[in-house]
Amino acid sequence: MKILPKINFISQIKAKPTPRPKQVTRPTFETASADGCVVHSEMPVFYKDGLAKLSTKCYPSYSAYESHAITTQITDESGRLMGDYSYSLDPIERTIDYGYIKTKHDFRHKGVAEIMRLSSLMELKENSLQSIKIDALSEAVPFHSKYKFQPDLKGKNSTLTILDSIVNKTKADEKDKKGAEKLIKKIVNDGEEDPINLTKGEAKEVNGYIAKYIKKNQNNWEDTNFHHCLPMILTNKQVNKFSSFFNKLFQKHGIDYTI
């Protein structure tokens, strides 16, 4: 009788979950400009590997009609810069604009950019702003989409460039290509009432299509992205709609703040 070899069953070692913060910090806010621009004070936050420091500064404009420059930074316990986020706060339009989040290479995929996004949400809420607008680099589109940003295309040229890129993507789904082709024909043949901007109906249809395309292809984005900047927007209404999602992220990073 053939004796089967003895098999040793080794239990799988499960990865340890990220420890929950041992402490939470309630942010305080201070007025940083004559027209009442509010930013949060310096505070400790938790990222994947431990404790860091989050700080935000406002550089007020000299005119009540100009935007304020805002800079957010995260540093580790030794003072090394982990990432920063610079943007403008428009006190007239009530928006955050032109933001660019940068994370140092050694600190990527550790929640650093996520913390900076949460920082901007506190400024959005505390200043009663209407929205955050960005021009997302193509490779960063899935990241911003994760935090509920939506496509915000309005110009015909940029829209046609992105749609044409999808049509010519070798690895794009044929159904997606046909959808892009259909939108291109609709925009090109709309009578040229406005040669620069999409109509309200076109913008709604195009941005809805792009949002679905991003969601569908986020797991193979390197092969399917359109390699062009995409205007995106996160409205105060959307933040409120997904408050539970954002509140869990605040808790995850040890920030006692509730939307």
Image (tube, grey):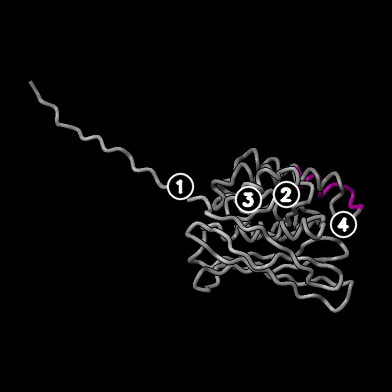
Mark 3 and mark 1: span between their CA atoms?
42 Å
Circles 3, 4 touching at the beta carbon (< 8 Å): no
Mark 2 and mark 1: span between their CA atoms?
26 Å
The image position of residue 224, as x and y in percent, is 58, 49
Mark 2 and mark 3: span between their CA atoms?
42 Å
Q: Tell me the amino acid under the disc marked 1.
A: Pro
Judge whether residue 187 is colored magenta.
yes
**Front-most of 24 and 113?**
24
Boundaries of the magenta span:
183-193
Q: Name the residue under label 4.
A: 195
The answer to whether residue 8 shows anywhere in this view is yes
The image position of residue 27, as x and y in percent, is 68, 60
Mark 3 and mark 4: span between their CA atoms?
24 Å
Q: Tell me the amino acid under the disc marked 2.
A: Ile
The crowd level at tag 3 (other Cα within 10 Å; few <14, some 14-19, many 20+) is: few
Q: Mark 2 points at which residue?
A: 259
Circles 2, 4 touching at the beta carbon (< 8 Å): no
Q: Which residue lies furthest to the left in this view?
A: 1
Q: Which of marks 2 and 3 is nearer the N terminus?
A: 3
Q: Which of marks 3 and 1 is nearer the N terminus?
A: 1
Q: Residue 17 carries which label?
A: 1
In which image quadrant can residue 185 be found? Answer: top right
Which tag is nearer the camera, tag 1 or tag 4? Answer: 1
The image position of residue 131, as x and y in percent, is 79, 55
Q: Residue 168 carries which label?
A: 3
Mark 2 and mark 4: span between their CA atoms?
41 Å
Q: Which residue is drawn at 66% across and 48% down?
A: 247
**Quadrant where the N terminus is found in the figure:** top left
- Callout 3: helix, strand or loop? loop
Mark 1 and mark 4: span between their CA atoms?
54 Å
Specify whether 226 is left or right of 181: left
